[in-house]
Amino acid sequence: MAAADQLRAEAAAPPWQFSGASGMSLAVCAVLLGLGWASGQRLGRRNAATRVDCWVLSWLCSDVLVHVALEGSFVYLSVMESVEKSDSILASLWKEYGKADARWLHSDPTVLSVEILTVFLDGLLALVLISAILKQKYYRHFVQITLCICEIYGGWMTFCPEWLTGSPNLNTSNWLYLWVYLVFFNGIWVAIPGLLLTQSWTALNKMHQELSKNKKCE
């Protein structure tokens, strides 16, 4: 009987509609990504970076802004209390995301642990990598590979434990929650690091070939 009542309640529920909270959340993300893009392009042009590195710098600046400003606020709210119990403007953004993944509302230990690592380690690595690209440091690709592995590992540890338990906290009932909140906003931090790993592999392979060629000429 309880199951039948639940089915009737779901059928009677009003259809999902795009809300003001949805729009505000997407607008904040767009602003952070836009500021990152503009900052990276400006840094690249001022320091005569290649076109590809200008795009990499834009991504890294966006990466830092999102990690520090957005995810940093989640860590703060979760350590102090929880997103669900906070009434701040930043909490409202995470409450909106929490409609797609409820773990972000209740300071889930796995999610919070990953986010602490992301904010402090990934944010620092991204800043070091920006400096390494601008100053053409020898350790650029070492830092880039490390950062990318951390980003991909963070994505894996965010969702793998949930998948193994049947995804009880994920809400995929509409396109915004599934394709924008869950797939896009998490997938972008896997896809772009994957491309950067490919770039580092290609660059290191080229350097190795040049070094081998020079040794043969001696």
Image: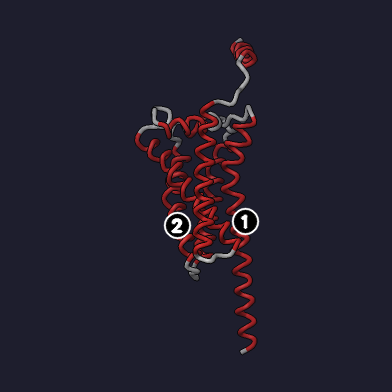
Q: Is residue 153 shown to the viewer in this render? A: yes
Horizontal side of 67 relative to 79 (left or right) equals right
Q: From this viewpoint, which residue is outermost toward the bottom?
A: 218
Q: Where does label 1 land, which residue?
A: 195
The residue nearer to you, when weighing 165 against 195, is: 195
Residue 113 got which mark? none
The total number of labels drawn is 2
Where residue 110 sits: x, y (%)? 47, 40
In the image, residue 3 sits, relative to residue 159, either above or below, namely above
Residue 127 got which mark? 2
The answer to which quarter of the image holds residue 52 is bottom right
Q: From this viewpoint, which residue is outermost toward the left?
A: 80
| Amino acid at pointer 1 | Leu
Where residue 42 sits: x, y (%)? 51, 57
Horizontal side of 4 relative to 115 (left or right) equals right
Horizontal side of 3 relative to 25 (left or right) equals right
In the image, residue 197 sits, relative to residue 157, either above or below, namely below
Residue at x 60% of width, y 79% of height: 211
The residue nearer to you, when weighing 76 against 164, is: 76
Quarter in which the N terminus is drawn = top right
Q: Is residue 169 shown to the viewer in this render? A: no
Circle 2: is it few (<14), some (14-19), or many (20+) Cα within 10 Å?
some
Quarter in which the C terminus is drawn = bottom right
Residue at x 53% of width, y 44% of height: 157
Task: Tell which circle, 1 or 2, labels the residue nearer the N-terminal end.
Answer: 2
Circle 1: is it few (<14), some (14-19), or many (20+) Cα within 10 Å?
few
The answer to which quarter of the image holds residue 11 is top right
- Using the numbered discs, state the Cα–Cα distance from disc 1 to disc 2 in whole angstroms: 19 Å
Where residue 167 sits: x, y (%)? 58, 33
Single out the mark in the foreground, 1 or 2. 2
| Amino acid at pointer 2 | Leu
The residue nearer to you, when weighing 26 against 107, is: 26
